[in-house]
Image (cartoon, rainbow, N blue to C red):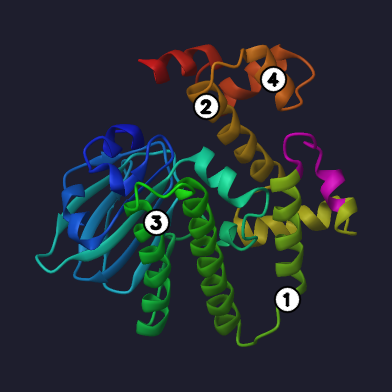
């Protein structure tokens, strides 16, 4: 099911329609047996154990103190849960994420979804309680249906959650490397991702990013491959595809205008790019989304 369909199954004080859904530990068990797709999913497990399956992959066992950031195209299936399960689930869609972060996504978040490993982080009790406090603030704001600035505050608290997660990722990465100084490669990755999130619509050429970072295109490609297990172009491509999917699914903007918005010289080039990476034409994708 989609995020929109899932939102309709829960009381309105837990969501902003077509934007974000937050399930507290009391409601979390209602995810059991459901398969969710089309949005990002954050899971913070406070107690107990559970299982999930991403697409056709193997079942994953998740336990206490684990944080997962699932940014995947495949459906996420929620399977068995222990009797004492207590967890938070935060499900923002692309539009809410983009609006909340306003071209300032935490630069380390890409390392958290490195495809070479399961995207999970093990937290100690202090870290877990600190992050849960951020979830509670978002929950309190969502619950206040009469607050005039409810949507704006929710975006601010989501931003706080992302920054807190980014802080945890950086700290744990530094501890794993045996030091507290960010390496030159990490600085290149952070700078590259900041630039991509700001310029991906207008700049599709890797040399643009390499020049801004004062490195060669070959060196940038090598660092991105080592750190993210993908090419710089793949990072840019993923941002373009996400934005294209959002515009096709959630707006009535003509495909020609979407092509121009994403800085493709010809609509035919955009259609070819989209079909190659999404497996269907833009018009077919839009039609399937409406159905």
Marked residue nearer the N-terminal end (3 or 2): 3
Relative placement, left or right, of 187 versus 226 is: right
Segment tinted magenta in the rendering: 199-210
| Label 3, label 4: how far apart the Cα atoms are | 37 Å
Q: Is residue 188 above or below residue 53?
A: below
Label 3 CA crowd tier, 10 Å (few <14, some 14–19, many 20+) = many
Viewer-side label of 3, 2:
3
For marks 1 and 2 on the same chain, the one whose residue lies earlier in the sequence: 1
- Identify the residue shown where x is 52% and y is 27%: 278
From the viewer's perspective, is residue 41 above or below residue 75? below
Number of residues whose C-alpha sits closer than 10 Å to that of mark 2, classed few (under 14), some (14–19) or many (20 or more)? some
Q: Distance between the residues labelled 2 and 4?
A: 15 Å
Question: What residue is pinned by disc 1?
Answer: 183
Would you say the residues marked 1 and 4 are in contact, meaning their CB atoms lie under 8 Å apart? no
Q: In this view, does 266 lie above or below 279?
A: above
Side of 246 where 66 appears, left or right: left
Question: Residue 194: within the magenta?
Answer: no
Instruction: Give the labeled residue for mark 2.
Output: 278
Q: Name the residue under label 4.
A: 259
Residue under label 3, please give it.
141
Q: Answer with the quarter of the image where residue 65 lies.
A: bottom left
Q: Which of marks 3 and 1 is nearer the N terminus?
A: 3
Quadrant of the drawing holding the N terminus = top left
- 3 or 4: tag closer to the N-terminus: 3
Measured as percent of width and height from the top left, residue 141 is found at 39, 56
């Amino acid at each position: 099911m989609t995020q929109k369909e899932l939102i309709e199954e829960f009381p309105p004080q837990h969501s902003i329609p077509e934007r974000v859904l937050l399930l507290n530990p009391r409601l979390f068990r209602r995810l059991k047996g459901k398969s969710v797709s089309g949005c990002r999913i954050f899971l913070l497990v406070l107690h107990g154990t559970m299982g999930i399956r991403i697409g056709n992959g193997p079942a994953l066992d998740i336990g206490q103190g684990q944080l997962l950031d699932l940014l995947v195209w495949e459906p996420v299936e929620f399977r068995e849960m222990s009797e004492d399960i207590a967890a938070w689930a935060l499900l923002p869609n692309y539009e809410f994420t983009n609006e909340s972060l306003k071209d300032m996504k935490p630069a380390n978040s890409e390392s958290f979804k490195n495809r070479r490993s399961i995207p999970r982080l093990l937290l100690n009790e202090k870290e877990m309680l600190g992050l849960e406090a951020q979830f509670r603030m978002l929950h309190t704001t969502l619950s206040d249906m009469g607050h005039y600035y409810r949507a704006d505050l929710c975006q601010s608290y989501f931003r706080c959650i992302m920054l807190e997660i980014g802080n945890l990722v950086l700290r744990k990465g530094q501890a794993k490397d045996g030091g507290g100084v960010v390496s030159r490669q990490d600085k290149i990755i952070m700078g590259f991702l900041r630039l991509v999130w700001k310029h991906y619509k207008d700049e599709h050429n890797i040399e643009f990013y390499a020049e801004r970072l004062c490195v060669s295109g070959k060196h940038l490609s090598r660092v991105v491959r080592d750190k993210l297990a993908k090419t710089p172009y793949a990072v840019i491509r993923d941002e373009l595809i996400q934005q294209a999917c959002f515009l096709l699914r959630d707006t009535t903007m003509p495909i020609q205008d979407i092509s121009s918005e994403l800085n493709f010289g010809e609509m035919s080039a955009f259609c070819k790019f989209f079909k190659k990476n999404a497996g269907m034409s833009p018009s077919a994708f839009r039609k399937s989304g409406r159905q």
